[in-house]
Amino acid sequence: GMVLDHAGPLVWIDGWRRLPGDLKGDPGAVTPDLAVEIARDRGAGHYIEGTAFLEDSTLTISLELHSVIGDSLVDRASASGDLRTATAPQIGLAALTEMLPSLVGPGLDVDLSLIRDRSPSAVALWLDAEQAYRSSDFESAARLYGEALAEDSLLVLAALGGVAAGVWMEEDETARGFSESALAHVEMLPPRYGSFALGMDHYLRGEADEARERITEAL
């Protein structure tokens, strides 16, 4: 889900948080009627449900994309991988990437290469860091962003997350360290993220006018 937040026009809404308490430990018991009800309540246009099947060391993840309007099935996608050479996040991302054209519609280009081409273990750590960040556990988030970068220094989104976590903790040295990691590969970032990275670097240097200009570009 958090991957979708970095996929251009898409916004992910966590449906799990809206489940009744007795269903949070058993998502497989969620009925289509409840899924539609939660999606409509949150103003979502689609909802995704998925299953995971493990046979020997092969994991298969299957996803179904439903439209809230009429609860119609829009698309199916699946991906399989050997867990001796791949991770569950990597396999899930492969299935999601296959489904993206149906999610974004014609004429919209979504580039997940920032994540898809990176180390699966680094991506998994980055996702954990994003979850910690959203829970305002900035110390854990910063640690996990750092571990993700240690796994793969080209996962620049982890560096950007670390900058933000450092700022929230008011630990400028931490934020500056992550900023250096981001700027080392800023050319890999899409324009809006690149502008944000440069803006935060100016901010950490106390260069307010330049920071405002770059962050306005990002917005």
Image (cartoon, grey):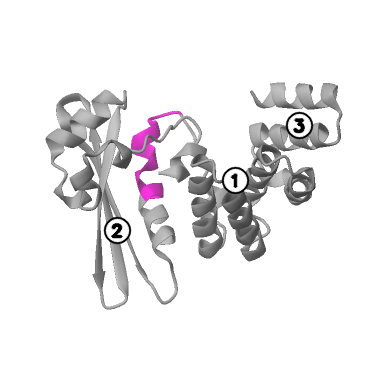
Q: Could you say which is closer to the camera, residue 174 or residue 192?
A: 174
Q: Main secondary structure of the magenta part?
A: helix
The residue carrying mark 2 is: 61
Query: Regarding mark 1 in the picture, which secondary structure is present there?
Result: helix
Instruction: State how far apart marks 1 and 2 are (Cα).
Output: 31 Å
Q: Residue at position x 62%, y 44% from top?
A: 161
Marks 3 and 2 in Cβ contact (< 8 Å): no
The part of the chain drawn in magenta is: 96-107
Q: Amino acid at mark 1?
A: Phe
Check residue 203 for magenta coloring.
no
- First in residue order: circle 3 vs circle 2: 2
Q: Secondary structure at mark 2?
A: strand
User: 212 left or right of 92?
Assistant: right
Per the model, the C-alpha gap separating discs 3 and 2 is: 39 Å
Q: Quadrant of the N terminus?
A: top left
Look at mark 3 in the image and give the residue it sits on.
199
Residue placed at 60% from the left, 59% from the top? 148
Who's the residue at 66% across and 63% down the image?
150
Q: Nearer the viewer, residue 150 or 50?
A: 150
How crowded pointer 1 is (Cα within 10 Å; few <14, some 14-19, many 20+) is rated as: many
Determine if residue 110 is in view: no
In terms of depth relative to the viewer, which is nearer, 36 or 171?
171
Residue that mark 1 sits on: 138
Dot 1 or dot 3: first in sequence order is 1
Q: Amino acid at mark 3?
A: Gly
Image quadrant containing the C terminus: top right
**Residue 195's image quarter?**
top right
